[in-house]
Amino acid sequence: MLDIDFSARISAIRSTYADIAAVTDLPKLDREIAELEQQASAPGLWDDPAAAQKVTSGLSHRQARVKKLRGVESRIDDLEVLVELAAEMDDEDSEREAAAELEAIESAMQDLEVQTMLSGEYDERSAVVTIRSGAGGDDATDFAEILLRMYLRWAEQHDIPTKVLDTSYAEGAGIKSATFEVEAPYAFGKLSVEAGTHRLARISPFGSADKRQTSFAGVEVIPLLEEATEVEIPENDIRVDVYRSSGPGGQSVNTTDSAVRITHLPTGIVISMQNEKSQIQNRAAAMRLLQTRLMLLQKEQEAAKKKELAGSVTASWGDQIRSYFLYGQQLVKDLRTGHESSQPDAVFDGDLDGFIAAGIRWRSLSKND
């Protein structure tokens, strides 16, 4: 039989679960779900699309959170039954199955435990992620596309829906930039620790001298805010350009000028959108994202002013957050947390949970210092 102390480990899991359930306040979540379900079933809900979106999104997020918590509790109960049956029948196959499920539940508990640290104002929100290539020529644009795939693969592995909103392809390899939505509870809280400058060091596949090339890409993460529609933007503050959506190599993927680029003249913020089929839909989506950015910019300016008045202007986050080494030593290392992986291929294929969890813990500790 396997040398595993199931009793002690299951007891530890139950203790951790009890702490998480207490912090999460399940009874309160149940009450909020009941209230939102009542609002969602009200006649005329969609007479006000913005309010309806807020209700349905809030309901969906809370239901997903409760389902996840209660699902783990049910798995712990089932595990105890499986362990008892394996012991009674002296069945090593059943014990191996129990051991595998034990590790899976422990991993799920770590994820729930990290989630309790996500208490920021927008942490519960879905996210909008933008990746931009930096210095490094073709290597940088190629790196930006690698990062785009990495985050989409991470979402896919967690069954999280994503929608690419805009992609600007480079003339050579890769992309200049891409923006996509990640539609899931706590997507912003988790992915916000990925924001910053990422550095890739490798033997360039685009050079002829087998020289090491360092390239950079920036990741920006903002929350998806329904209430951002309350931000009023005067028409004379924006310039709207329309153009045809395009794919790699400049090939047209649309025969009409449906893509939209909105420039906010006072701030210089530019939003491009080409995912939707019509110009009207792309303009509406671009305006919502612009309103979100302006709301966040206002809050950042207010926070910066408060820091200035308090006499503190030091930043806790550096620009460069992570390095990816693909020559000699194969390594991905986070420069804030020290978390690292010797399997960059797995990381680029979406294995980011360790980095995200370490980033959330680091941020939580930094706030408490």
Image (cartoon, rainbow, N blue to C red):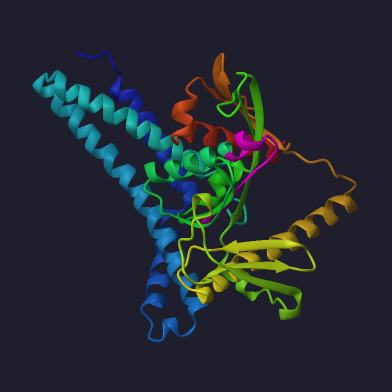
What residue lies at 29% left-to-right and 23% top-to-bottom? 6
Residue 129 magenta-highlighted: yes
Return the residue nearer the eye: 146 or 267: 146
The picture places residue 156, in percent across and down from the top left corner, at 39, 45
Q: Give the quarter of the figure containing the N terminus.
A: top left
The picture places residue 152, in percent across and down from the top left corner, at 45, 45
| Residue 310 against residue 149 in the figure, above or below | below
Q: Which residues are magenta?
A: 124-141
Q: 287 left or right of 108? A: right
The picture places residue 80, in percent across and down from the top left corner, at 23, 32
Q: Give the quarter of the figure containing the C terminus.
A: top right
Q: 354 left or right of 99? A: right
| Residue 1 against residue 279 in the figure, above or below | above
Return the residue nearer the eye: 100 or 87: 100
Residue 154 magenta-highlighted: no
| Residue 210 against residue 43 in the figure, above or below | above
Return the residue nearer the eye: 234 or 36: 234
What residue lies at 53% left-to-right and 37% top-to-bottom? 356
The quadrant in which residue 138 appears is top right
The quadrant in which residue 303 appears is bottom right
Could one spot residue 19 in this view of the protein?
A: no
Q: 82 left or right of 292? A: left
What residue lies at 23% left-to-right and 14% top-to-bottom? 2
